[in-house]
Image (cartoon, rainbow, N blue to C red):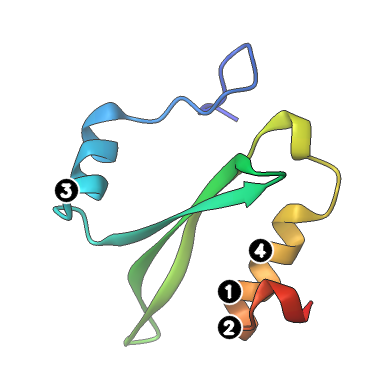
Amino acid sequence: MENIDSRGRYNIDEGRLSDVISGNEECDAYIILAEGGDAGFVTIEQAEIVGMEMPELSNIFILPKYRSQGMASKIVRVLCLRKPVSDM
């Protein structure tokens, strides 16, 4: 887990984050919310798999406070099934 610092926070490359926010990086970033605040994030990039362009889950990060509660599994199901969270 090279991207996690000693306090359990995600150590993201600031340049890449700036590119994602400004739209210069070809990926979609989503903030995961829980209890009225940020609980983590997920990024999705286009990848070529078996000669086809398709979305790829490139990063998923859950803050330590929200880990071991099934949140990452739920997010992956939502992304794969494209169902609203309220349906799960």
Density class for disc 1 (Cα within 10 Å; few <14, some 14-19, many ≥20) is some
Q: Residue at x 62, y 11 (%)?
A: 6
- Asked if the residue at tag 2 contacts the one at tag 1, i.e. Cβ–Cβ closer than 8 Å, the answer is yes
Disc 4 and disc 1: Cα gap in Å?
A: 6 Å
Residue sitting at 61 percent across and 49 percent down? 33
Residues at marks 1 and 2, CA–CA distance in whole angstroms = 5 Å
Residue 75, numbered circle = 4
Ranked by sequence position, the earlier of labels 3 and 4 is 3
Gap in Å between the C-alphas at discs 3 and 1? 23 Å
Q: Position of residue 21 (x, y in %)?
A: 24, 46
Residue 53, how many percent across, how many down?
Answer: 32, 83
Q: Badge 2: how crowded within 10 Å, few (<14), some, or many (20+)?
A: few
User: Does the CB distance between marks 4 and 1 fall below 8 Å?
Assistant: yes
Where residue 64 sits in the image (x, y, percent)?
73, 30
Is 87 placed above or below 66 here?
below
Disc 4 on helix, strand or loop?
helix
| Amino acid type assigned to the residue bearing label 3 in the image | Ser
Residue at the spot of label 2: 82
